[in-house]
Image (cartoon, grey):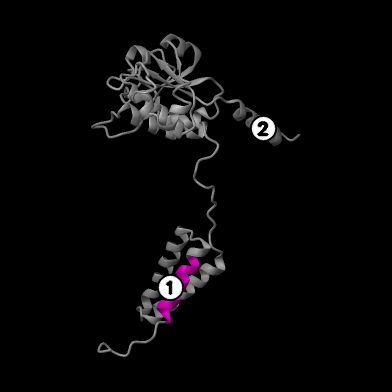
């Protein structure tokens, strides 16, 4: 076995045994908040909902009403536990909008954005919980002091505070690769048109410049700009064929006799 092969198998084993993070909600103020988070979990592949001091969740109430299809599995399978059990059992990531600016205040510092967190947690083999606090005040300093790391969503400094459902949805969206193997979007590989076809487009463009009597000294620059524009666009074969057809049609248009016609 080569070193590369051994490394690949080890990496595959690590990914296979890494658990999808749980989502914990501490002292939710309304059942609707819990339902909204459960729905976001269902959207992005998370299943393990942990509730600390939750409100009553009536199957006929707003929690189940807000949960969408998560009412069928995520919400009824939620586990209730104490905050002490949460921090003792899981590697905890506390979500907050308010951070400290540097290490002079280390209760809310250092911190990661959800995107940074997603990249790092992909290689962490530990029972992990993403922890959200109350709708009004979030997680307290006392709670954050017992949490392992901090996550925050970059936002307008004049108003960085999101409501609980928004914060959970954005965070879980960024972390979805930790939970989902695929999404509803088709896995379509974009293929650049073959170079001979693109060269025909460039020739047609040059022919059009001559047909419209574009000033001769400016044609080289126009050719170059068009080539660079198409080069950055990476057109597909279908797009290039359509472009070529339009350029040829414009170049080969019937001559106009005079303005009176």
Q: Where, quadrant-wise, is the C terminus in this rendering?
A: bottom left
Q: Main secondary structure of the magenta part?
A: helix
Image height check: is 27 above or below 243? above
Residue underneath mark 1: 246
Spatial separation of the CA atoms under disc 2 and disc 1 = 52 Å
Q: Which mark is residue 81?
A: none
Whether 10 is among the magenta residues is no
Residue most toward the front? Answer: 60
The residue tagged 2 is: 7
- Crowdedness near tag 2: few (<14), some (14–19) or many (≥20) residues, C-alpha within 10 Å: few
Is 250 magenta? The answer is yes
Q: Residue, x 45% and y 13% (percent of image)?
A: 86
- Rendered location of residue 92, percent (x, y): 45, 18
Q: Is residue 122 above or below residue 251?
A: above
Question: Considering only order in the chain, which callout, 1 or 2, is on the residue closer to the N terminus?
Answer: 2
> Residue 245: x, y in percent?
46, 73
Q: Is residue 191 left or right of residue 261?
A: right
- Magenta region: 240-252
Out of 25 and 101, give the one closest to the viewer. Answer: 25
Q: Which mark is in front, 2 or 1? A: 1
């Amino acid at each position: 076995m080569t070193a590369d092969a051994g490394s690949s198998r080890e990496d595959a084993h690590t990914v296979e045994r890494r658990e999808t993070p749980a989502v914990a909600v501490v002292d939710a103020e309304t059942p609707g908040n819990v339902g909204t988070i459960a729905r976001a979990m269902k959207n992005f592949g998370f299943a393990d909902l942990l509730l600390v001091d939750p409100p009553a969740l009536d199957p006929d109430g707003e929690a189940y009403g807000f949960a969408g299809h998560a009412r069928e599995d995520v919400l009824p399978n939620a586990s209730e536990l104490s905050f002490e059990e949460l921090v003792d059992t899981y590697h905890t990531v506390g979500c907050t909008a308010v951070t400290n600016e540097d290490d002079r205040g280390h209760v809310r510092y250092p911190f990661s954005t959800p995107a940074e967190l997603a990249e790092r947690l992909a290689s962490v083999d530990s029972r992990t919980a993403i922890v959200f606090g109350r709708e009004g005040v979030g997680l307290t300093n006392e709670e954050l002091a017992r949490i392992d790391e901090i996550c925050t969503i970059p936002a307008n400094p004049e108003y960085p505070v999101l409501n609980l459902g928004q914060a959970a949805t954005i965070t879980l969206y960024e972390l979805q690769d930790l939970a989902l193997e695929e999404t509803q979007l088709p896995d379509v590989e974009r293929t650049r048109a073959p170079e001979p076809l693109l060269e025909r487009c460039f020739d047609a463009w040059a022919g059009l410049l001559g047909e419209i009597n574009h000033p001769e000294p400016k044609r080289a620059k126009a050719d170059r700009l068009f080539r660079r524009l198409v080069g950055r666009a990476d057109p597909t074969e279908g797009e290039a064929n359509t472009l070529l057809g339009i350029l040829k049609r414009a170049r080969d248009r019937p001559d106009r006799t005079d303005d009176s016609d």
